Amino acid sequence: MTLGGRRRQPPDRDDVAACEDAAVRILAGAAQTELSLRQRLERRGFSGATARAVASAMARRGYIDDDAFARAVTERRVRRGHGRALVAAQLRARGVGERPIADALEGVSREEEMAAARRLAETLVERTSGRRADDPRRRLSGIVDAMRRRGYDMDVIRAALRHVDLGAAADEIP
């Protein structure tokens, strides 16, 4: 980086050695998928062909491991209250293939997902409890919608909501 936060363009967009140096710096900062590394190298000014070749070489050398990346992201997201569907979508958006996604999600037990869903449900119930004007159905609908946006399916949502105090809305669980 230069002063002012702007990145210097590489002297040669096709300089493989400079691209590899940039890739190593990127990978030292955080794990990447092959796709995300390629995109970051292109944003730094390297040509698509050079970025693609270097990202592929880094993967062949073992510096990129989509399986480990998928597992780490999945564990972190589940702890933060994200459901399987949202985690899978986030991994796909970052260029992870279907097999590593399936393997990572397989590593999340139903109990872990339920615990995260219950924590989210408790937070949402607490967050909406002070709203006197809300009717119970509307409040429950908002909680369900928020949990669906977090990637939980209706079976998990129903089970999680049975473990929290919904007051008058308890009879309205879909």
Image (spheres, helix red, strand yellow):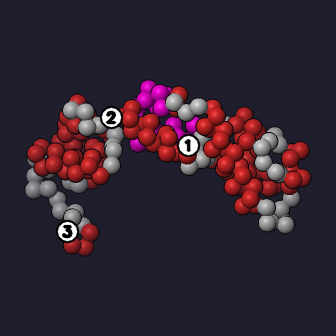
117 on left or right of 166: left
Residue 102 is situated, as x and y percent measured from the top left of the image, at 49, 28
Q: Mark 3 to mark 1: distance in Å?
A: 38 Å
- Residue at 39 percent across and 38 percent down: it is 69
3 or 2: mark nearer the eye: 2
Note whether residue 51 is visible: yes
Residue identifier under label 3: 2
Residue 146 is situated, as x and y percent measured from the top left of the image, at 67, 51
Question: What's the magenta region?
Answer: 84-104
Rate crowding at label 3 as few (under 14), some (14 to 19) or many (20 or more) other CA atoms within 10 Å.
few
The circle drawn on residue 65 is 2
Identify residue type, mark 3.
Answer: Thr
Identify residue type, mark 2.
Answer: Asp
Q: Earlier in the sequence, mark 2 or mark 1?
A: 2
Residue identifier under label 1: 78
| Label 1 SS | helix
Vertical arrangement, residue 6 with respect to residue 146, above or below: below
Q: Earlier in the sequence, mark 3 or mark 2?
A: 3
136 on left or right of 17: right
| Residue 101: in magenta span | yes
Q: Mark 3 to mark 2: distance in Å?
A: 31 Å
Q: Main secondary structure of the magenta part?
A: helix
Q: Residues at badges 3 and 1 in contact (C-beta under 8 Å)?
A: no
Residue 112 in which image quadrant: top right
For the residue pair 166 and 51, the one nearer the viewer reads as 166
Rate crowding at label 1 as few (under 14), some (14 to 19) or many (20 or more) other CA atoms within 10 Å.
many
- Residue at 19 percent across and 39 percent down: it is 54
- Residue at 29 percent across and 44 percent down: it is 37
Q: Earlier in the sequence, mark 3 or mark 1?
A: 3
For the residue pair 119 and 1, the one nearer the viewer reads as 119
Residue 124 is situated, as x and y percent measured from the top left of the image, at 71, 55
- Residue at 55 percent across and 43 percent down: it is 78
